[in-house]
Image: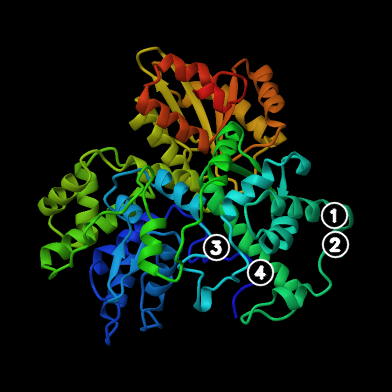
Amino acid sequence: MARNTWWVTRPKRSLPPVPRCLMAIALEAEGKVWKTTDKTTELTIEKNLELAGLKAKGKRRDQTGGGARTYRAWLKSLGLVFMDEDGKFWLTDAGEALVKQEMPPLTVLKKQVLDYQFPSAFTYKGQSAVDSRFKVRPFVFLLQLLLDERLEGYLNEKEEIGKIVIAHGVSNKQSCVDDVVSRILEHRRIGDESLEENYVELYTTPRAAPLLEKIFANHGDIANTCGNWLGYTQLIERYKGTWTIASGAEDEARKLVEEYSSKALVAKPNDEEYFQRKYGLRPGKFKDTRRLEGAGSVSSKKIEEKNVLLVAEKYVAERLINRVDTQLVADIAAETGVSAVETERILSAKYPNGLVDSFLSEYVQMAFESRDKATEFEKATTSIFADIFGLYAEHIGQKGIVPDVVVASREEGWSGILDSKAYAKGYSIGHDHRNRMVEYIERYPKYGPEFATLAFFSYVVSDYKNSVTPQIRTISEKSGVPGSVITARDIVRMVERHQKKPYTHSEIREIFSLNRAITFEDIE
């Protein structure tokens, strides 16, 4: 029985691991017949997923290769892979761009999320099937709603997207938008009484108990995954279950909605290769003209290369790799058993310019991982200021009553202190945190570099509440030092701008000394 709502699969709740997952599968399976009687391909892929840090290492109770198939389905749903009529596994053009690192992950996956549609090769039939009444690009539909003035610029994830939008967003036509807006406004007025009397009958699935609270929970999970995917594109912000268009992204969102209003859905979802090669085009490309050739035999050298690259991609999630250095070579050689000389050769050939784009894709997600990724987030922030912006930067957060990071300009003699807050929800500077920052500033001579005078303090966060600007100014008034708060998303935007037109050290100091929340306009 087909689902009567939108549906997205989620072996991982968010998208940053997609390139690693894709590489783990493609290095083993591309050009090969997937199905084998002994499950060799699938079991080898599961080992690859472990090397890439996507699955926990250890003895697998499931020896059927189910994990590999689950991840393959995820990548298929995003238009990155397909199976041809002979049962061979292939990358789409977009998938190839990711594996070969010919485009930044954000650029490719943003296009795939916005192009995601019902029906598709993934949702046309089988256990993933979605009812044929849905002929819609769901993520574009969500942007249409968020831009609709009648909804006052926001949507509630569980109450509105989960209960209403995923069930009634059947097309991107304005008439459908009007219908869903009307339903949401009625729900805001009278709550669940506005829902269909036979809601359970309409939206239960074979795998879920026919209970209203179970259906609501399931729909909430779907809405949450949609939020993770759309949030990855940097077009929306989420706080305590409320979605809004990201600050500074309003014009882009309107332009995208207008662009997609005249863009037809991809045809033939019943033909996997045709559909996936159309859907899976990298940005700026309109036709897949590649000749797909067989994989051939796999030598021991190829296996060594595969293992080195998989572990390298895992390290990308942990630190910025701006270049291949001796420490990176030693770490990967030790983990894979491949000689240091061969490891260096493989890495230098594959990553002559480092792995900056992959790292930045992971960095934004770290900011939302709560305390689970706090230390990694602090170290990643340090790496950005040192390896990209060219400042002195030191991670000192484990050394007592000190901030997480101190940065400085040797040339200009100034420094700044950063506190990285990897909170899953928007950050507000509570009373204790304000007092702590004042103490950090007062204690600066004990830990700060001798060559620099403290010029600013700043918080690097996933998102922030409107109250942060007056809170920053309160700290500044007490300490005599200006401050700021910036999102991880805007740190990435700074990096992108810096790669096109490098900031001077004085420009960086000016941005972080604004004594308020840093906005999109400030970094441009």
Q: Nearer the viewer, residue 84 or 480?
A: 84
Q: Are marks 3 and 2 in contact (CB under 8 Å)?
A: no
Which one is in front in this view, the residue at disc 3 or the one at disc 2? 3
Q: Nearer the viewer, residue 135 or 93?
A: 135
User: Splitting the image into 4 quarters, where does residue 324 fall?
Assistant: top left
Which is nearer the N-term, disc 4 or disc 1? 1
As helix, strand or loop, the secondary structure at mark 1 comes to: helix
Task: Identify residue type, mark 1.
Answer: Glu
Task: In the rendered structure, find residue 194 and report the number of the disc placed on it.
Answer: 2
- 518 horizontally vs 120: left or right: right
Task: In the rendered structure, find residue 118 and report the number of the disc placed on it.
Answer: 3
Task: Identify residue type, mark 2.
Answer: Ser
Q: Are marks 4 and 1 in contact (CB under 8 Å)?
A: no
Category of crowding for the residue at label 2, using alpha-carbon neighbours closer than 10 angstroms: few (below 14), some (14–19), many (at least 20): some
432 is higher (above) or lower (below) than 196: above
Category of crowding for the residue at label 1, using alpha-carbon neighbours closer than 10 angstroms: few (below 14), some (14–19), many (at least 20): some
Q: CA distance from mark 4 to mark 1?
A: 22 Å
157 is higher (above) or lower (below) than 72: above
Q: Are marks 4 and 2 in contact (CB under 8 Å)?
A: no
